[in-house]
Image (tube, grey):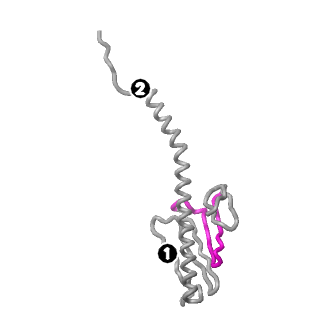
Amino acid sequence: MKRARRSGFTLLEVMLVVAIVAILSAIALPTYADYVRRSRILEAVARLSDAHARMEEYFLDQRTYVDAGGRCGAAPVRPAPADAFAVSCLATSATFTYTATGLGAKGMDAFAYSIDQTGARATVSLPYGWSRTADCWTIRADGSCA
């Protein structure tokens, strides 16, 4: 008698593939999440640097950091729907501070960064477990700065 030949995968082969995929995703997903978080932070600090430059240009033209209405001379750019940080500004005639605050809906609620008229960069707040380095914008959990 001829033996019927079966095609397909055995349960052991399927379980082996599932185990390999699980191990790869356990390694890749946290790394990807850190990559996305760092890219959002870099976007925020780039926006702060741009705002600082725009305020200095305004000051060179007007000799004050505030406009006629008492607001920042170079108003913060409105956030786009994809932005993970909201940028705000506080100013007097001789000083200003721009602050980028993380949005909770984007998973960045524990982050806040600032820059002032002297160009001093500060990390205002970070999530638990992150190390802060003075006088810079912390972009990694180990305290690395931008």
Question: Which residue is drawn at the image coordinates 34% and 24% (left, top)?
Answer: 7
Residue kind at label 1, given as amino acid type = Val
Q: Which residues are magenta?
A: 105-128
Q: Residue at x 50, y 39 (%)?
A: 22
Where does the image place residue 15, in percent across and percent down from the top left?
A: 47, 31
Q: Is residue 145 above or below residue 13?
A: below
Say what secondary structure mark 1 lies in: loop
Q: Quadrant of the N terminus?
A: top left
The image shows residue 64, relative to residue 109, as above or below, that is below
The label on residue 121 is: none
- State the residue position of label 2: 10
Q: Quadrant of the C terminus?
A: bottom right
Residue appearing at x 62%, y 87% in the figure: 93
Pointer 2 and pointer 1: residues touching (CB < 8 Å)? no
Compare residues 142 and 71 and report the one nearer the observer: 142
Asked whether residue 124 is in view, the answer is: no
> Which residue is the site of mark 1?
77
Q: Is residue 115 magenta?
A: yes
Q: Amino acid at mark 2?
A: Thr
Tell me which label, 2 or 1, sits earlier in the chain.
Answer: 2
Q: Tell me how far mark 2 sits from mark 1, CA to CA.
A: 58 Å
Which residue extends farthest left?
A: 1
- Circle 1 Cα neighbour tier, 10 Å, few/some/many (<14 / 14–19 / ≥20): few
In this image, 135 relative to 18: left or right? right
Q: Is residue 120 visible?
A: yes
